[in-house]
Image (tube, grey):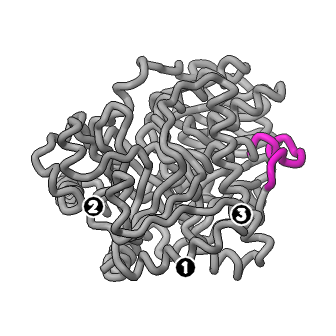
Amino acid sequence: MKRIYEAAAYGPQGACFWAETVPPMDWPALEAPRHTEIAVIGGGFTGLSAALHLAQDGVEVVLLEAEHPGYGASGRNGGFCCLGGAKAPHSLLRKRHGEQGLREWCQTERAAIETAAALIAAHGIDADTHSEGETLLAHTKRAWASLRESAGTLPALYGVTPRLTPREELADEGLGGPFHGAMTTPLGFALNPRKYHAGLARAAQTAGATLHGHSPVTALRHLDGKWHLTTPRATLTADRVILATNGYSSEDLPDWLRGRYMPVQSSVIVTEPLSEAQRAAAGWTSRQMAYDTRQLLHYFRLLPDNRFLFGMRGGLTATPRAQKAISAKIRREFHAMFPAWKQVAISHEWAGLVCLMARLSPYVSAVPDHPGLFAGMGFHGNGVAMGSHAGLLLADIAQGRRPRARHPLVMQAPPARFPLGGFRRALLAPAYFGAALFDL
């Protein structure tokens, strides 16, 4: 395996609160050679959704996870099941794919939320869901003007009308803070990602999928019409393979992937439970999942047990020095936004990897020039819904049949390579610097 970050970026990165909310779960390692119809590499939302839908269709499927269940971003994220998946603005997607292509993408964003909701309902997953859609908070007057202008486009693109809240009315909605207004879109919900992940795993196993943990794929080769997946203890052969590794991908699994994805660190802190008086002091009493209009955005929400979750993009490296710096930075920005909570204890802090693509849009399709290989990745920090939906699409695509859900052109464009190859992380520093200037 060839990865572009320091090893620490792929290891345990702090005490994740979600891990304490589910019973311990483990999947046995692949111990003996075997063959399967379809192999899935990666045990996150995308991989589990694909395995579940394949098993429900009667397909023999074996999933290989490099570490323990919930190890990657699916077990560490902020729990925002919302619109998203691409970082490209609507104007760019319209230029690339036309008005119809943009509308198909927006409809897929909405369908992804519905896919996650349907999975939760169908399999009785208690994922602590809450929040009536998502709330976007303007961090400047200019951003508020932009929100008001963009609100008019949502009915045509998403079929819903957002609610605009001016600055003077934010307190009445429990949205206290240094904000200039808010736009609430009534699509999506918040959840406990580890509970959702555990529920998907149970559903996949019940349907007949075989799940293996502690089985990193160290080599992937196509020989004699079969895919050979090498793990430390045994080799799995498969007729077809689904790559669902996202930000935890490797440069050589397969070589085609080299330079086509950009892992980016995201950091999260969670407070001790806040009292009613503490919540009132900050003016934040809402259960809405929220984020701000910065390019380097902050995302935050009040959890069901009254802890407060606050996240932002992480460091550029995973060295101890960088981790210490981002730990201090996230606290500074949290306290600047909510000064009433400067003395509130932080009980948990962790980080994980999200995945960006050079075209700023996800890829969910067959891998070019690799017969029987398929990939779903590049959800740009919004993989709860879109990763779940990608798994559903891949289950059909890998079977060679028409997807049961719309498969927009945005997802089918082969990903371009980033400049600088294995050194492409160097692009992040100037990009972050430019974004920070734009956010002023």
* Number of residues whose C-alpha sits closer than 10 Å to that of mark 3, classed few (under 14), some (14–19) or many (20 or more): many
* Vertical side of 69 occupied by 322: above or below: below
Q: Quadrant of residue 428?
A: bottom left
| Amino acid at dot 3 | Trp
| Amino acid at dot 2 | Gly
Query: Quick one: which residue is furthest to the left in this view?
Result: 343
Q: Residue at x 65, y 73 (%)?
A: 153
Circle 1 residue: 149
- What's drawn in magenta, residue-wise? 394-406
Q: Is residue 191 visible in the rendered structure shown here?
A: yes
Circle 2 residue: 177
Say if mark 2 contacts mark 1, CB within 8 Å. no
Q: Residue at x 67, y 75 (%)?
A: 93
- Counting from the top left corner in percent of width and height, residue 244 is at 61, 45
Say if mark 3 contacts mark 2, CB within 8 Å. no
- For residue 105, which numbered disc appears in the image? 3
In the image, which is nearer the foreground, mark 3 or mark 2?
Answer: 2
Instruction: Name the main secondary structure of what is drawn in magenta.
Output: loop
Which circle's residue, 2 or 1, is located before the other in the chain? 1
Q: Residue at x 62, y 42 (%)?
A: 46
Task: Identify the image quadrant of the C terminus.
Answer: bottom left
- Based on the picture, tell me whether residue 386 belongs to the magenta stretch: no
Q: Is residue 413 visible in the rendered structure shown here?
A: no
| Amino acid at dot 1 | Glu
* Vertical side of 262 occupied by 350: above or below: above
